[in-house]
Image: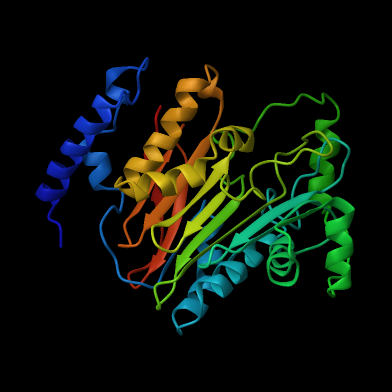
């Protein structure tokens, strides 16, 4: 196993290579790469399968459902679907599924995607009145020749496959929306005011070494009717390559889409970066291109075939949940700011 000293030496070599490539050009030198101590605390060490990783504190109960499948030898695909369904059905989570905050017109609209070890993928976008969009996305993957269905087409497909429509706007979410209407001031979500509010993305490796991932959300609160973020977009919110690793995103989806962040991270890992390095570079690309980056949050988490886990975010506050043989716990992500 790699020692701490060997890891930090390797990190120094990686830093030199990244510096030569111009990482962080135009930014403060201290932001070219985080300190060695932060990297050493990033779980960037090999681990045995199975394990599951998910975003935010609502990932803890989701991980438990996924682990129930993984620990008895079940497939990663079943685990990630079952895991995020917990969050979709929780009315206390106001950013995913039932209980999600509506758009500015009072409609709860849902986006989700799923990807398996073979590179198959399915997604739904702008789906209304269906409790579990992740399961609809899986059926799109398994029962149609397509990757994405949207709007009424996605709803009709769900109903044809036995999903019963229901009102997803909870009394609490409706009260919050009506309060917002008094000013109707819209600002992209920032985590300082509500560290629990955002997408759940989940990645897993099963006992056979196969990978899968899932992502599901109700999107930004009080968004324009019809807005779709990164959560149903394969390569943006989620990407899985069984030969390399997997990555997922959370935060302001427009920034993730413009840099195709999860695909980028997996490709950087393919080229030899660790998960921590790859997540940092994906955040660096957003920061370099967007002068308003201090007002945005994006967080990435990824792992590679060795079981090394890494993460990085624009702003402090992003946490991800990890469950393996050592238990279920939250981890604070390093950040740019």
Residue in the foreground of this view, choosing between 194 and 117 = 117
Q: Residue 216's x, y, as percent?
A: 65, 55
Can residue 195 be seen in this snapshot? no
Measured as percent of width and height from the top left, residue 26 is found at 37, 14
- Left or right of 55, for residue 135: right
Which of the 4 image quadrants contains residue 327? bottom left
Q: Is residue 207 above or below residue 40?
A: below
Residue drawn 44% across and 80% down? 71
Please state the horizontal and vertical placement of residue 261, each as a whole percent of the image.
51, 40
Quadrant of image for the C terminus? top left
Q: Is residue 251 left or right of residue 130?
A: left
Q: Residue at x 38, y 58 (%)?
A: 244
Q: Count every numbered label the image shows and give the total.
A: 0
Q: Residue furthest left?
A: 5
- Which x, y percent locates residue 113? 65, 57
> What's the image's color scheme?
rainbow
Above or below, comparing residue 258 to residue 289 in the picture: below
- Quadrant that contains the N terminus: bottom left
Is residue 175 visible to us here?
A: yes
- Along the line of sight, which residue is nearer the eye, 191 or 282? 282
Q: Residue furthest front?
A: 145
Residue in front for this viewpoint, 181 or 199? 199
Position of 173 with respect to 165 (left or right) is: left
Residue at x 69% of width, y 53% of height:
96
């Amino acid at each position: 196993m790699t020692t701490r000293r060997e890891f930090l030496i390797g990190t120094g070599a990686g830093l030199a290579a990244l510096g030569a490539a111009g990482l962080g050009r135009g930014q403060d030198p201290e932001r070219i790469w985080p300190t060695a101590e932060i990297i050493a605390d990033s779980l960037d060490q090999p681990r045995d399968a199975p394990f599951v990783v998910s975003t935010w504190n609502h990932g803890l109960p989701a991980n438990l459902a996924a682990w129930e499948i993984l620990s008895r030898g079940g497939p990663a695909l079943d685990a990630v679907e079952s895991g995020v369904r917990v969050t979709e059905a929780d009315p206390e989570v106001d950013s995913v599924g039932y209980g999600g905050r509506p758009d500015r017109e009072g409609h709860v609209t849902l986006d989700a995607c799923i990807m398996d070890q073979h590179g198959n993928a399915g997604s739904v976008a702008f789906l209304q009145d269906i409790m579990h969009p992740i399961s609809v996305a899986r059926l799109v993957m398994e029962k149609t020749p397509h990757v994405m269905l949207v709007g009424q087409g996605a709803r009709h497909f769900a109903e044809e496959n036995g999903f019963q429509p229901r009102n997803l706007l909870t009394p609490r979410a409706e009260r919050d929306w009506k309060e917002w209407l008094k000013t109707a001031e819209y600002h992209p979500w920032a985590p300082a005011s509500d560290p629990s509010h955002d997408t759940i993305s989940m990645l897993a490796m099963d006992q056979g070494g196969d990978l899968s991932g899932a992502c599901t959300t109700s999107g930004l609160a009080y968004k324009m009717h019809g807005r779709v973020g990164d959560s149903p977009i394969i390569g943006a919110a989620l990407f899985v390559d069984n030969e390399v690793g997997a990555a997922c995103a959370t935060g302001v989806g427009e920034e993730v889409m413009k840099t195709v962040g999860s695909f980028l991270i997996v490709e950087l890992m393919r080229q030899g970066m660790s998960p921590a390095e790859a997540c940092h570079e994906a955040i660096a690309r957003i920061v370099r291109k967007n002068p308003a980056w201090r007002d945005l949050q994006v967080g990435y988490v990824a792992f590679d075939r060795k079981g090394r886990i890494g993460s990085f975010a624009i702003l402090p506050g992003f946490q991800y949940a990890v469950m393996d043989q050592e238990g279920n716990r939250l981890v604070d992500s390093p950040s740019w700011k």
